Each structure stands twice: as C-alpha cells, then as structure tokens.
Amino acid sequence: MPHPPQEITSSSLPTLLLLLPLFSALVILLAHRVLKGACVAISIFSAAICFVISLMLLGTKDAAPLLLPFIEVGKFHIAIDAVMDHQSRGMMFIVTSIGFFVHLFSVGYMKEDESKERFFGSLSLFMFSMTGIVLSGNLFMMFIFWELVGLSSYLLIGHWFEKPSAAEASKKAFLTNRIGDFGFMIGILMLFMANHGDVSFAGLHASFAEGPLHDSAKLHPTFMMLAALGIFMGAVGKSAQFPLHVWLPDAMEGPTPVSALIHAATMVAAGVYMLVRCAFVIEASPDASYIIAWIGGLTALMAALIATQQNDIKRVLAYSTLSQLGYMVMAVGLVALQAGGSHHDAAAPGHPAMFHLYTHAFFKAMLFLGSGAVIYACHHEQDIWKMGGLAKHMPVVFITFAIGTASLMGVPYITSGFWSKEAILGVAFEVKGGSPLLWIGVATAMLTAFYMTRMFIVAFFGKPRSENASHAVEAPIIMILPLALLALLTILSPWDGAARILEAMKPHHAAPHHTVEIASILALLIGSGAGYVIYKGKNSDPLASNPLAKLFANKFYFDELYTVLVKVFQDGLAWIITGIERILVDGIVARLPAFVARRFGHSARALAGGHLQGYTFLLGAGLLVVIYLIVFVLPQAGH
C-alpha cells in the first residue's frame, strides 16, 4: 500500500545505517588481497559509525522513511522501508553497540589468524543483515534480511572451515535454519493472501484491528493459528527453540567473538524481536499463543538441564543462551494470552520479552567475550576442568565475569537480570493457566544458579589443573576494554535513568509480585548453594557417573535421534524414490522406447545391407501383402 506522507526526521541516517556495513563487506571481500591490514580498520570504522548513528537516532521521533521503492502494483507493495520507533531504536542500539565491542575484541583475539580479513568482511555482512531485520517495515523485507543473516552466520561459524567440526557446524546451522525459514515463508504468504497483498507491519496491524485479518481471525481460527505458528517457525529456527535447538551449541566451533555476536543479542535475538514486532498476529490466536508459551518454557528448562553437565565453557554459555531465549519466547506467548485479542501496539515500550532481551544482551555478550579472554589466556583450552585458579591470574576478567554471572543468575535488586526475569515470571503469575509455566521458570532459575556457580568456581577458583591455566595472564587492553564497557552497561541497564536514555523496553509492571519474588530468591539460594557445596575444591565432576547426569551431558541424545530419523526417513525415502526413478522413469519411460527403436532399427538395417537376395525377399513379401489385401481384405470391407 502507498506510504502516506509522515513527519520524518531524515531518511539519510537509516539509509547510511543500512548500507554502510554492506559497502564495507563488499570492499573487504572483493579487495582483501590488495587492502590486507586495512580491511580490519574499514570494518571497525563501519561498526563505529553505525554505533554513533544508532545513538543519534535514540533522540529522534517515530518515523517510517521509505529507503528504496521496489515493486508497487495496486495494493501489492514491496519496498525497502524503515520503521523507527521505540522498539527498533532500542534493538538497533543493542545490535550496533555489541557489534562494535565484538569488532574491538576481535582485533586482539584474531590478530594471529591468517584469514582475519575474510573474518572482518563476514562481520560487516552480518551487521548489514541484522540492521536490515531491525529496520524492516514489512515482512518481505524482513524475510530477505532473515536469509542474509543465515548466510552470514554460516560464513562466520565456518570461518575455520579447514576443521571438519567447524565445517559441519556451519552446515548444520544453515540447514536447520532453513527448516524454520520455510515455515516463516508459509506464514508470510498466508498473511499476504488474507490481507490482499499488504504485509507491511502498519497495514497488518490496522487489518487485525479492523479489516480482513480481523474477520479471518473470527471466522477462520484454524487458518489464523497456522499463520501465527508459521511466523513462529521462523523464530524457532533463528532463536533455536525446541525442536530446532540443536544447531546453536555446535555453533561454538566458530571463533569466540562470533559466539558473542550470534548468541548474545543479534542472530538468536532476531527471532524474539520478530515475534514482538508481529505480536498482533500471535494475539489473534489463543491456541498459537498457548503453544508458543509452552515451547518457550520447555526449551528453557531443557537447555538448563543440559547446561548443568557441560564441561566446555562456551557450551555452558550456549545452553544458557538457549534457556534465556526460552524465557523470552515464553513471555511472548504469555503476553499474547494476557492481551486476549486486544491488539495493543506491540511497538510500544513495555514488553517483558524485549526487556529481558535488552538486559540479557549485555551480560551474555560480556560472558562470551570473557570466556574468549579465558580461552585466549589458556592457549585455546576450553575445558573448565583444565582451568582453575584464574581469579588471581586474570583479575579484570574475573570481576567482569562475576558481574555477568550474578546478572544471569538474577541476584536480587542489584542486577539487571533479576528485574527482567521477574517481569517474565510476573506475567506467568498473572495469566490464567500460567502457573505451570511459572514453576518451570522458577526451576529454570534454580538450575541457572547451579550451573553458573559450577562453572565460575571450577574455572576461577582452586588450583590450576593444567600448565596452560598456571601460566595464564591478563588479556590485552584491546580485549579488556569491551569487557569493561559491557560490564558498565550491565550494571546500568535496569535503572530508570538508563531506560529513559536508551528508550528501553522496561515494563511498567516490572516490580515483582511477592510470591514470585520469594520463589525466585529461594531458587537462587538453593541453586547457587548446591553448586558451591558440590563443586568447591573438586578436580573432577562428582556427578559425572550419575545416570541423569550422563543423560544431560549427552544432550538428551537429540543429535543421535535426529541422525536415526534422517537415516530412516530421509535416506529411506530417497532410496524408494531412487528405485522408482530407475525402474519407472529411467527404465520404462526413457530407456524402453529407446531400446525398442534401437532393436527395430538394427533389424531394418540388416535387411538394407546391400545384398541382392535381401532386396528380392522384401519385394516378394511386399507383393504377397498387396495380393492378400486385394483378394481378402478389400472385398470384406466392401460388404
């Protein structure tokens, strides 16, 4: 639909914000052999400018600038257009700030890498893709950049493609996301048909309030449920929700800055951002809202259980990310149930899922970068049981890691994670039928305190358990600076002053209920206390021999289950189709007529071989056929 004239600040800033990372990526990827070391500076300069632009946009008015008209035929409208509101400005600040910090950290972490130019080019491409998702004013534009994020994450996860594990992880991430993206595309097409070709967020929101989609939701609830679940499938892939969660832990094979960028606030958070942007679609179907809330809750609990028995420091944080994303998705479903079809403005500040995304982004990025500093100092050792005693060798990393751990565990009143987690649990407490999800959330909080205490004690306290740990030294200043800045943002993010400056998404009802507050504090004390008692002073995991611990350590055997399913169903189906193709298509349809023609031609060639007796035989046979036709066939035809 045509865009009505609106008061806008300027389309130049969103355009520059969108295109600058693209130009940076193209220059680096096409001319890295010539530019060499300058590629790093170009990528960092691009990230810094984008960060500054996002800060400038924080103070602007809501606007919808049209960046690039694409196709406009009647009501059918596809364009590259931006949406500048509270939600996109806050998300853009998160993406660009963490992206800039990751760029800085990568200068130190990747300085010895022979392909760092390609790495920074892929970082710029990723920033372009994420910027496009955040700015998207319609679902078509979002889907295009959605796929670009999948491509750029494939390049980053597989940066060390010479390692078989990294190559396999990048392919696994790419293919798993395509499954979710296929459902996302179906959901978009269903809305496209129901709303007469208009899939802009403004048009969809108006249509749900009073229009074709409002009527569809009332008259065809099954159609609307399938459309909402199709949209949700996109988030299941990108945000790694059950059952498509298996790609995220394997993505740890990429460089640690990639882990911070993908798993903190960008790629995996894109699914949550999209769900909140499309909240009115989910609210139109209570059944879809209920399913989404339960998938989020079960993902949070499952990932937390798995994290309790992971020994790779990055995998612990990866499953922690899965768990926290489950919290956010659960909040999306619960808020949709709470809305009850009122179709409030999802772009307005106040969504608990976005508030948790906002706080989680900073402390999880800090934890990932802190784990990278630990891995770098321990000569790329990632097993926490081969660390120990790092607190005295790396005091700055230790302090920042402690701040991030406290925030993730939700230490009451003084950490950002407490306020955002309590906002989600408060919604579960308020929603009718949400009590089971409330207690799932509380159990997840207890497990979070347990596995983070376990990792923190094992890695930073006690005696060094390896030569690498005993010789660890503090990370260089280029790696320490992003950690310090992220620690500052982690501390400031829950407070009202910072919320006003950043136009953050803190809900008005963020103050926890007393029941929720008491349950949450008890969960923290039980989980952290159990972790401290069990693992203090231990040199190996005392729970490793427990059957349940083995189940958690092997990730509920999902990878093995999927391998069997692929072999039985995909490979079995491929074998059947191949057999049908070879017998029916290749054999009967294609080869049989060719065989008959070849044999007939071979026989005819034998009769026309230049021998007189052959020609005489053909002449006599022809005369006999003619006589037979004249004497016997034609008289019968006359009668």
Image (spheres, rainbow, N blue to C red):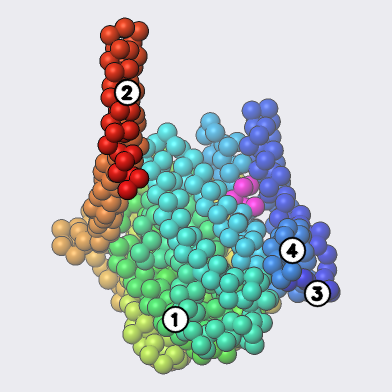
- As helix, strand or loop, the secondary structure at mark 3 comes to loop
Mark 1 residue type: Thr
* Position of residue 610 measured from the top left corner of the image (x, y, whole percent): 35, 7
Q: What segment is highlighted magenta in the picture?
A: 124-128
Q: Residue at x 72, y 60 (%)?
A: 71
Residue to which mark 4 is pinned: 72
Q: Residue at x 49, y 40 (%)?
A: 159
Task: Mark yes or no: residue 390 visible.
Answer: no
Tell me where residue 17 appears, x and y as whole percent. Answer: 73, 56
Residue 622: assigned label: 2
Query: Mark on residue 4?
Result: 3
Q: Mark 1–mark 3 contact, CB under 8 Å? A: no
Numbered disc in front, either 2 or 1: 2
Q: Earlier in the sequence, mark 3 or mark 4?
A: 3
- Name the residue located 44 percent from the left edge and 46 percent from the top edge: 170
Distance (Cα) linking label 4 and label 2 = 71 Å
Please identify, in this view, whether the residue under mark 1 or under mark 3 is nearer the observer. 1
What residue is disc 1 on? Answer: 222
Q: Main secondary structure of the magenta part?
A: helix
Q: How much space separates mark 3 and mark 4, taking CA atoms?
A: 14 Å
- Give the label on residue 246, or none: none
Disc 2 residue type (three-letter): Gly
Q: CA distance from mark 1 to mark 3?
A: 33 Å
